[in-house]
Image: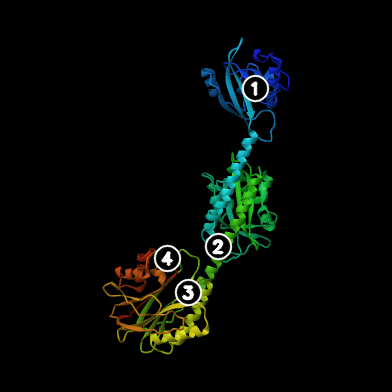
């Protein structure tokens, strides 16, 4: 209408004051006939619509502004019963607005106009700004909740793969349609190094909506790695520590991410229109990158998305870096421990032994468990099972010191109680700061006996030829390193076919269960006694915990060889 009415004034607004009120207000006012066609629009609605009043005359709102949505059923209810009602009108008009989708709240009344019959009068107020404010407030609350959730949902373990999966699961579909994480690869064991000037990224985890999983499989190409040259957006993110954004990206922009034109075609085929690459950076080094994509009807990334995703990336980088460092420490400690345990001395030929070492299934740290078999004079064999306090690389190093010291002391041929006493005294004198439990047992095939002594360690068990298990409860002396001494030995018969089992607490210890009760439960087992010792140990491990342990497990089994072997 643009300030001038193209229709004669209706009778109800013929009065000059009333007309000035209706045509001077900023609130849009319309009058509709019984068919919801326009009889009148005031200048305010003309400014909103960008159309003159004559464009509305005799036409419905849908005919004039098809991009606006109005609940006509509500209007017909007002015509039918005369009860005023509120209705919402939303959409876009010919007038550009920074608010995008616009929203009006209108009240409609039934009126009787001379010469027109029953009509509707609608008065509206635009609430687009208020709706946008409330929407922005709700979005901010959601983003804060997402950042808060990251603290509890990302980095719940010290496993890199799990941490990366937790990150992509948090991002999609909350903030993106597809997400993938790649980690900077620093070790090239088992594969040739990348070409000079290239950075190697290891593909870890990704998530995509149903029907788009193929895109993640094909984007990185064959193999577990992607070698990234300089000048690529991914490399630029890692070098600068800043995210890269490609909204409604052209093929040229996609090329900055993919390098390979074939991968650009894959993005197009999947309907991906916008990409965001966020670096995973710690204060000391780059860890990796997150690739995020929006496809189909999803909106491009905005500034709020950028801030939220980078904040999540910063938090996730610390968790992933911690997982990588602990994984490296775990690998070193495990290799050291396996190297040490793979070299027990050969027992006397009259005794056969078998051993197992299993790192914990719930922790990335390795403990100080060790075992050994040492041949002694007169066909005897000394069996050793020990557990140094603590976990990790330092515990494994301390274990190697204790093992070497015990081997030296055992060469004296003294009784097991005397060996433990000297072992305890020397460890205390050397000032080694880690206590250890230790169990010694001497198998004497000639006498058919076993003599054992314990320094705070769990008691051994013997498996009889009839497959029954019996725990040998020993006098328990103080742990090694206290300097208290005072160890006692116990000698028991070992009939032919009887097997002696030494183990660490990881085999039997269970949360919320007394350790003595757990040890006693060994006597409920029936183990194969006449087959290879390896079969016996496999059965023992399977029946106790199905392969899942809360702590490291070391087991040593020994029995007298049959004279005919």
Where residue 326 appears, as percent x and y from the top left, is: 55, 66
Asked if the residue at tag 3 contacts the one at tag 1, i.e. Cβ–Cβ closer than 8 Å, the answer is no
Towards the viewer: 197 or 14: 14
Towards the viewer: 217 or 261: 217
Gap in angstroms between the C-alphas marked 1 and 2: 64 Å
Q: For the point 45% across and 64% down, which residue is it?
A: 361
Check the image and report above or below for 26 versus 242: above
Quarter occupied by residue 561: bottom left
Residue bearing mark 1: 29
- In this view, the residue farthest toward the front is 17
Residue bearing mark 4: 549
In the image, which is nearer the foreground, mark 1 or mark 3?
1
Residue bearing mark 2: 323
Asked if the residue at tag 4 contacts the one at tag 3, i.e. Cβ–Cβ closer than 8 Å, the answer is no
Asked if the residue at tag 2 contacts the one at tag 1, i.e. Cβ–Cβ closer than 8 Å, the answer is no
Gap in angstroms between the C-alphas marked 1 and 4: 75 Å
Residue 148 visible to the viewer: yes
First in residue order: circle 1 vs circle 2: 1
First in residue order: circle 1 vs circle 3: 1
Q: Secondary structure at mark 2?
A: helix
First in residue order: circle 1 vs circle 4: 1
In the image, which is nearer the foreground, mark 2 or mark 3?
3
Residue bearing mark 3: 389
Q: For the point 69% across and 55% down, which residue is it?
A: 236
Where residue 197 appears, as percent x and y from the top left, is: 68, 61
Which part of the image, by quadrant, shows the N terminus? top right
First in residue order: circle 2 vs circle 3: 2
């Amino acid at each position: 209408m643009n300030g001038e009415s193209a229709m004669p004034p209706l009778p109800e607004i013929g009065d000059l004051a009333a007309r000035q009120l209706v045509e001077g207000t900023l609130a849009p006012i319309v009058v509709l006939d019984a068919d919801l066609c326009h009889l009148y629009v005031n200048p305010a609605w003309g400014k909103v619509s960008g159309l003159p009043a004559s464009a509305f005359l005799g036409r419905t709102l849908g005919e004039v502004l098809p991009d606006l949505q109005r609940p006509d059923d509500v209007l017909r209810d007002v015509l039918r019963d005369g009860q005023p009602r509120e209705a919402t009108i939303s959409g876009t008009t010919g007038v550009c607005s920074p608010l995008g989708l616009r929203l009006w709240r209108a009240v409609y009344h039934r009126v009787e106009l001379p010469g027109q019959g029953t009509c509707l009068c609608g008065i509206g107020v635009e609430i687009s700004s208020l709706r946008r404010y409330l929407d922005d407030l709700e979005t901010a609350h959601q983003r804060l909740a997402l950042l808060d959730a990251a603290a509890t949902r990302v980095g719940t373990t010290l496993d890199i793969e799990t941490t990366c999966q937790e990150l992509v699961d948090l991002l999609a579909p909350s903030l993106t349609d597809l997400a993938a994480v790649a980690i900077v690869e620093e070790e090239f064991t088992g594969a040739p190094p990348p070409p000079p000037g290239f950075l190697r990224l290891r593909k870890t985890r990704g998530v995509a909506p149903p029907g788009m999983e193929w895109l993640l499989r094909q984007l990185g190409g064959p193999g577990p790695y992607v070698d990234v040259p300089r000048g690529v957006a991914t490399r630029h993110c890692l070098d600068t520590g800043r995210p890269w954004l490609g909204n409604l990206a052209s093929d040229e922009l996609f090329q900055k991410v993919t390098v390979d034109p074939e991968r650009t075609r894959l993005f197009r085929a999947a309907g991906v229109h916008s990409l965001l690459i966020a670096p995973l950076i710690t204060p000391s080094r780059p860890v990796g990158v997150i690739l995020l994509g929006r496809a189909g009807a999803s909106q491009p990334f905005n500034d709020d998305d950028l801030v939220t995703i980078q904040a999540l990336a910063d938090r996730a980088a610390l968790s992933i870096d911690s997982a990588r460092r602990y994984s490296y420490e775990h690998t070193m400690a495990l290799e050291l421990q396996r190297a040490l345990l793979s070299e027990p001395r050969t027992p006397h030929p009259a005794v056969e032994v078998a051993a197992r070492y299993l790192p914990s299934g719930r922790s990335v740290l390795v403990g100080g468990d060790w075992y050994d078999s040492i041949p002694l004079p007169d066909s005897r064999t000394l069996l050793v099972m020990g557990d140094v306090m603590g976990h990790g690389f330092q515990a494994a190093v301390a274990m190697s010191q204790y093992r070497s010291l015990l081997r030296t002391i055992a060469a004296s041929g003294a009784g097991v109680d005397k060996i433990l006493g000297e072992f305890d005294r020397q460890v205390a004198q050397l000032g080694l700061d880690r206590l250890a439990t230790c169990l010694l047992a001497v198998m004497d095939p000639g006498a058919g006996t076993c003599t054992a002594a314990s320094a705070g360690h769990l008691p051994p068990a013997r498996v009889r030829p009839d497959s029954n298990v019996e725990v040998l409860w020993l006098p328990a002396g103080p742990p090694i390193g206290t300097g208290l001494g005072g160890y006692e030995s116990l000698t028991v018969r070992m009939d032919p076919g009887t097997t002696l089992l030494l183990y660490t607490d990881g085999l039997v210890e269970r949360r919320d269960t007394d350790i003595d009760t757990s040890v006693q439960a060994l006597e409920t087992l029936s183990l194969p006694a006449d087959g290879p010792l390896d079969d016996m140990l496999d059965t023992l491990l399977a029946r106790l915990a199905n392969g899942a342990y809360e702590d490291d497990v070391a087991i040593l089994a020994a029995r007298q060889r049959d004279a005919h072997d």
